[in-house]
Image (tube, rainbow, N blue to C red):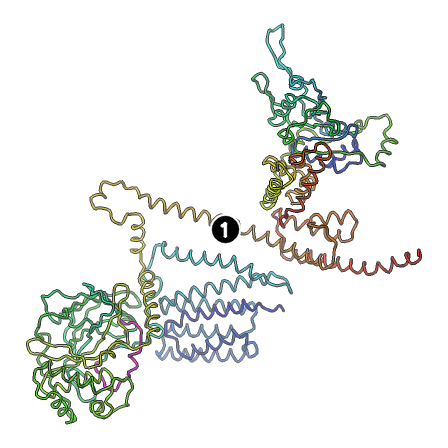
Amino acid sequence: MKRPLRLRLVLRDLGAGAAFGAMAVSGQLPLWVLGVFLLSLVLALCDVRLVARHSRLSALLLVIAAVLLGLRLTSGAMNAVVAACAFAGLISAQRMLSTPDAPADGQTHLTGLLMVAGGAALSGDMTYALCLIAFGVLASLSLALGVVEAAVPDGEPVPVRSVLLPLSGGLTFAVAGAMAFFILFPRLNWAMVGPRSAPGFGAVSSAGFSDTVRLGGAGTIKSNPRVVLRATLTPDPGREELDAYWVGRTYDTFDGQEWTNVVGALRTERQITLRPASDTLLHQRVELLPAYGGRTLVALESPSRLGNAVALTPTGTRASTVQLHGGGEVRFTITAPAYTYEAYSLPPDAKAVTASGLRSEERDQLLALPEHLDPRVAQMAAQVLNGEKEPLAAARKLVSHLQRDYAYTLEQGGPQEDPLADFLFVRKAGHCEHFATALTVLLRTQGISARLATGFFGGARMDGGYLVRAGDAHAWTHVFVPGRGFVTVDATPPSHRTSQGSVLLEKLLALYEAVEGRWRQSVVDYSFRDQFELASKLVRPPRRPAEATSTSSRLPPARAWVTAAVVAFLVWRLGRIVARWPRRALRLEATRFLDRVDAQLARAQVQRLEGESLEDLTPRLAREGHPLALALTPLTRRYLEARFGGRALREGEAEHLLGTLRRALEAEAARRTAEPTGQAGPTARAS
Amino acid sequence: MERLAAQLGRAVQGKPVEVQRVVTCVVAGGHLLLEDMPGVGKTTLAEALARACALSFSRIQFTADLLPADILGAQVFHSQTATFSFRPGPLFRQLVLADELNRAPPRTQSALLEGMAQGQVSLDGETHPLPSPFTVVATQNPVDFSGTYPLPDSQLDRFLVRLSLGHPAPDVEARLLTTRGAASPLASVEAVTGPEELASLRDFAAEVKLDASVAEYVVRLARATREHGDLERGASTRAVLALGSAARAQALWEGRDFVTPGDVRTMLVPCWAHRVLLRSAVQGVSARDEAAHLVEELSRKVAAPR
């Protein structure tokens, strides 16, 4: 059997890998499937075909996996689509590792196709599209190489370079054509590319708001650079770093371990007004990304109105109502991976507004202390404040004390009986929740009303809007100042308020997010309306005065004609190139055949005149009565026909002719070695 | 074509290659220039061609006092009807042998030239179409130049092929002596084809396929002659076209319906050697050989398509 071309197998396996990647980016596949496939891929790339030796065993394992997945499916632990995708991945892995013959190749490509289809059902991410393109290109190259390989006879080298070069050109055209098709073809379905993804690979819901804030929770969140929120502000502050507080909710009840709210769900509306305001408000158009993973609306401090929410669910977009909860928290009523909504906030220097959004029981709760509060806390507060009663001044004193004597750390001291006392008197180090809790409780011990607020701090400039990352999650304190309402006071050292991921990673992610945003906008959300707008933009000049439209002719402007002409020209050139392609390929084949004939003749040391072509050589040999002429004549004729007469060599014909020539050359060589002895006789006799 | 060649071979013995070129030239629809010593069978060849193809034939002996009217014809006054009518000259034949073409004055030569190029004759403001097919076989003596008017280059360019027969091989000459006797060699030539068949043969030749790469090869050859240091003037565009049609006819001769680079090389010297102009001012046989040598050298230097 012929040894398969290594490059083709590598391309095939990489193609399958890309197809698997198309599913894996959704982040929904079980980890063990991921592991099994990656291991198989690595083995296959190293040309270790395990299944070739243990095909029965692998089939048994597949059956076991199928049963396992089936059980998970029936128990409801797994989605049917995910189970099918996982199984397709396993089959593909098994096929990759089996003996690389034609059926295995076909099955690998087929499972690749299945996996890509599965990936489409799981996510519509940009990474999915990249995987899809990678699969298409790799699998096409591999298949084409397979066809060429089958046509090349045993022992002959496969002309990889000459195949791949035109093929790459063709693939480029194909990908470009697919894009053109995507842009120009009328969209029949708004959700054509696929559903809006569930949280993507690596986008584990990280910044979710729970009903409680528990001290001693994990602090690794600070280094997570995933973008959770994208907002456009009007008026645009225009700063590089916004460094603003995005409040999600506040807590008023602390029991020594965790913060909760006394009040539950209040009312459900399209729009919730927290603080009525007549001032010019800061408008925010916010998009919550899948990495956010929560249902709480966030807005810049201090939010006035929130609403007009749209949930981006896997089946499409839906308007969502919002629900007001205790602590000023506003939640979506629909669960979806991503949302968009609008919010209005009071500008930072807004005039005092009474806390009218607050209920009486909430207001009472602002001074409540945990039952078993360490007495040292109150002592410490009294000592630091030293009789200061003005709420803001007291808060500032405490803040400077905390920032001076306490260190910021993300390390956890493990579960504590009293985390606050541990922070204040033992470890003297903690993260934002510790600082904020300490400040709030210290203030309350001195009779100053305060509460804990959680949300995000930061906002990095991107494309005219601002990005907030999961690592920007933060907690701070609201101090109630009579006559002014709640004032934000942050006890956390300023350098530790925003996310602390590595700069390079953040830069890369920002770039990715920018591209991904473009992708969402121009691919996932690309609709018939966008097509229409694109077409009308092309046809209509952008800034035509309104009154001119009525008088001007209805003919499209010159720009449209030029565009049409350019497109027509390109299509025509393309058609010319494509039309010439097959003929050129045939000629090349005949020329290759000639090269091989020439090589054989040169090996056999057939004498040729300078610059003498095969066409001239054959009649000369025929005239000289050379025995080779007999074999060369039909061969030369066929070559000329194939090269100049447009009658291509049939499959296997070249090999047949070459074989005849080889035998003739061998016979000729045998005759020549026999000849000198025959000639030696008469010469010897003559001498 | 082969039958035609066989008939011609009967008349002109021992010259298979030259005979084949003549047939190729006729099939390609071109005019033929035979350049050779007297007495090697030029006239015989032309007459045999006319007979074998059953073409109407006339022979014009070109002399220094030959006038255009002598070959084209003239308006003749009829006294009874008091009108002029056109009396066609000897040129109005399907095959015209212009013997010793270079002895006629340029005026006469150019009258012939128009007929060859246009297939028609203009006389007193009237055009008279020449018969079809119309082929001129001209001969000239390359040695004896006294009292001749060398053909202008433009006129040479109108001959598709120039050939020289040369002396027959000694054994052929000996056979001629023994076998021929008194009988004319033309007596044995039979008509194997007619004008119609010749015309369809020409159509066939015109339809022979010329691959783009071969066409490019021809053009590259032409460029090589134009850029050659020893050549005053290279091959013209007409020369390129002529080589194309000659190569087509050659392919047909070989029994193919497509042209190979070999066909081009075969017809290269007969087609182009008389169309290029050497820088050195030699004339006659040596110039002819020199040009043929240069052109042939080019065919080896210019890479043929593979």
Q: Can residue B209 be seen in this view?
A: no
The chain that hosts pointer 1 is A
In this view, the residue in front, B44 or B294, is: B294
Q: In which quadrant will I find the N terminus of chain A?
A: bottom right
Relative placement, left or right, of A46 versus A130 is right
Write down the quadrant of residue A251 in the picture: bottom left
Q: Can residue B62 be seen in this view?
A: yes
- What residue appears at the point 56 percent right and 17 percent down from the top-left corner? B125
| Rendered position, A72 above or below B258 | below
| Residue sitting farthest toward the front | B280
Relative placement, left or right, of A520 versus A259 is right
| Crowdedness near tag 1: few (<14), some (14–19) or many (≥20) residues, C-alpha within 10 Å | few
Total numbered labels placed on residues in the image: 1
Reading the image, the residue beneath label 1 is: A578
Q: Give the range drawn in magenta.
A: A211-228
In this view, the residue in front, B4 or A471, is: A471
Relative placement, left or right, of B29 versus A187 is right
Residue A338 percent across, percent down from the top left: 27, 69
In the image, is residue A223 part of the stretch drawn in magenta? yes
| Rendered position, A249 above or below A562 | below
Residue B80 percent across, percent down from the top left: 62, 5
- What residue appears at the point 10 percent right and 69 percent down from the top-left corner? A276
Residue A380 percent across, percent down from the top left: 14, 91
- What residue appears at the point 60 percent right and 44 percent down from the top-left corner? B220
Residue A583 percent across, percent down from the top left: 56, 50
Which amino acid is tagged 1?
A: Val
